[in-house]
Image (tube, rainbow, N blue to C red):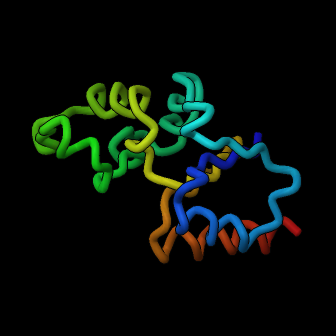
Amino acid sequence: MKKVFYLNSCDTCRKILAKFDLRDWEMREIKKEPITQEEVEAMYKITNSYEDLFSKKSTQIKLRELDLKTMGEDDFKELLLDHYTFLKRPVFLTDTEIFIGNDKKNIENLRAHFNGNN
């Protein structure tokens, strides 16, 4: 499995995607084609945390008046499945690895993954 979950309207996603050869990756625009329960669970198998997949910058947090400190893993899973903006993005998912978000360390790990698989 090689899937990339991204948002087309996200400039950061587009910049990151442009850095890599993604010809043999399945591209999933999460607004048009939301993530499934099976996909979220596949991500969880690698991270052991729904919270790690959760974007704490989502505008939905304030709109819904969510208190993240009181939420548990089931709450994060439910929200991830409920609205596409709750997924930290982009997410690169293989059978054994996951790269979540746009922080510098993640991009370095992603670059190492692509350089090691040429």
Looking at this view, name the residue that lies furthest to the front. 9
Quadrant, the C terminus: bottom right
Quick one: 80 or 32, which is closer to the camera? Answer: 32
Measured as percent of width and height from the top left, residue 77 is found at: 37, 29
Measured as percent of width and height from the top left, residue 12 is found at: 53, 68
Quadrant, the N terminus: top right
Task: Give the side of residue 93 with respect to residue 25, left or right.
Answer: left
Quick one: 111 or 90, which is closer to the camera? Answer: 90
Determine whether 43 is above or below 88 in the image: above
Task: Give the side of residue 67 with respect to residue 28, left or right.
Answer: left
Taking the spot 80% from the left edge, 49% from the top edge, the residue there is 25
Q: Quadrant of residue 87?
A: top left
Measured as percent of width and height from the top left, residue 32 is found at: 61, 35
Quick one: 55 or 12, which is closer to the camera? Answer: 12
Q: Quadrant of residue 65?
A: top left
Taking the spot 19% from the left edge, 40% from the top edge, the residue there is 63
